[in-house]
Amino acid sequence: MSPHIQFIQDASEPFESSGGPAGAADEPLDAYSRAVTAASDRVGPAVVSLQVTPAPRAELAVPRDFPIPPEGQASGSGFLFTPDGYILTNSHVVHGAGRILVTLADGRQIAGELVGDDPDTDLAVVRVFAPQLAHAAFAKPDSVRVGQLVIAIGNPYGFQATVTAGVVSALGRSLRAKTGRLMDNIIQTDAALNPGNSGGPLVNARGDVIGVNTAIIVGAQGICFAIPIGTAIFVTSRLIRDGRIRRGYLGIGGQNVPVHRRLSRFYGLPSDKGILIITVEPGAPAERAGVRVGDIIVAYDGHAVNHVDDLHKLLIDETIGVRSVITLLRGHDKLDVPVLPGESGAKAA
């Protein structure tokens, strides 16, 4: 049975050593404590709490049975990353929001404005209008290492400015977004996360943000996930510029299938897997290109396509309106079909 992955929403006495040189036993603890406190002191003022009231059902234009949380239930975390009020958080915290109330670290409450969100990467940008705000710095995307100390700050269960610490447990994990698309290069950590931590920062010992906390595995201990800062940097720039992430669209539905080994060897295919086309939308780019139900896509613009997730990764915004080539198998024939991808709306590739 696969694990249940849940997107998370909603002066001391001196230590005395009992033996050895005076102070020797507590030196590692002091170094650890100094790192955690310094990082939390640096980034803590930039962490915010988000209270989200869903938009009226008519504004959302969703079916009657679509599950919309009751008013006042949606909440999460976020953090300021510019001094003029841009906040990074999770899409699942603010998607469909009618009203966003942002509580700053100093207790001020300011109305937030949704700049844009991207459910496929579970990231969103919110804006508050106030000057000279404390803000967090982004780490270099390639600076994260397995085993390094990390600190998570957020508002689990409404407990504001909660700090937990742990290590990077693994890199390069994959996590499926609520939209069904695969999110890559996810950071796994054992820094404790709970409902309400969603959208809060995961930072290194310098207090630089390396990820955006997003999910946990229910029932597990210390298996938590964060979206890497490299993805966040790309998505935030596009959301601020366009209000959304543009992706290529073909208008097909498919499923992963094996390709007969004889066909794979005969045509020198890079893989013995592909996507069986089971639906083609009328008038979509794929139909105009001549793609048919029953075709098997094995490559896109020369890149091997082993499964649907591979095709999603290739249909980036740069492909929109740019002539590309779908390599497919039709019966025993191999065809190269030119296609002009459109732009996706609510539709998948």
Image (cartoon, rainbow, N blue to C red):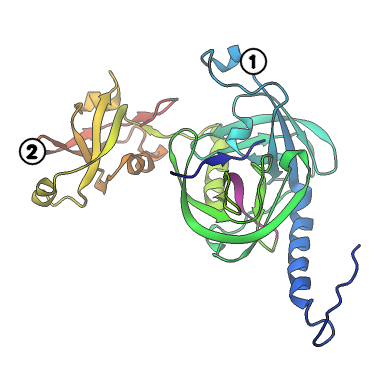
Question: Seen from this angle, which residue lies furthest front?
Answer: 1
Mark 1: few/some/many CA within 10 Å (<14, 14-19, 20+): few
SS majority, magenta: strand
Which of the labelled discs sits on residue 295, or is there none? Answer: none
The answer to whether 117 appears left or right of 342 in the picture is: right
Q: Position of residue 278 (x, y in %)?
A: 25, 27
Total numbered badges shown on the rendered structure? 2
Q: Position of residue 187 (x, y in %)?
A: 54, 54
Residue type of the residue flagged with mark 1: Pro
| Residue 208 forms part of the magenta stretch | yes
Highlighted magenta segment, given as a residue range: 207-215
In the figure, residue 312 lies in which quadrant? Answer: top left
Q: Which residue is drawn at the image coordinates 61% and 66% (left, top)? A: 148
The answer, for residue 240, to whether it is visible in the render is no
The answer to whether 237 appears left or right of 16 in the picture is: left
The answer to whether 4 appears left or right of 139 in the picture is: left
| Residue 96 forms part of the magenta stretch | no
Sequence-first tag of 2 and 1: 1
Q: Which residue is drawn at the image coordinates 21% and 50% (left, top)? A: 271
Depth order, front residue of 134/145? 145
Mark 2: few/some/many CA within 10 Å (<14, 14-19, 20+): few
Residue type of the residue flagged with mark 2: His
* Vertical side of 288 occupied by 330: above or below: below
In the figure, residue 67 lies in which quadrant? Answer: top right
Report the residue marked by disc 2.
332
Depth order, front residue of 23/148? 23
Q: Which residue is drawn at the image coordinates 27% and 45% (left, top)? A: 306
Question: Seen from this angle, which residue lies furthest bottom?
Answer: 21
Q: Position of residue 164 (x, y in %)?
A: 71, 54
**Could you say whether the residue bearing mark 2 is in a helix, strand or loop?**
loop
Report the residue marked by disc 1.
56
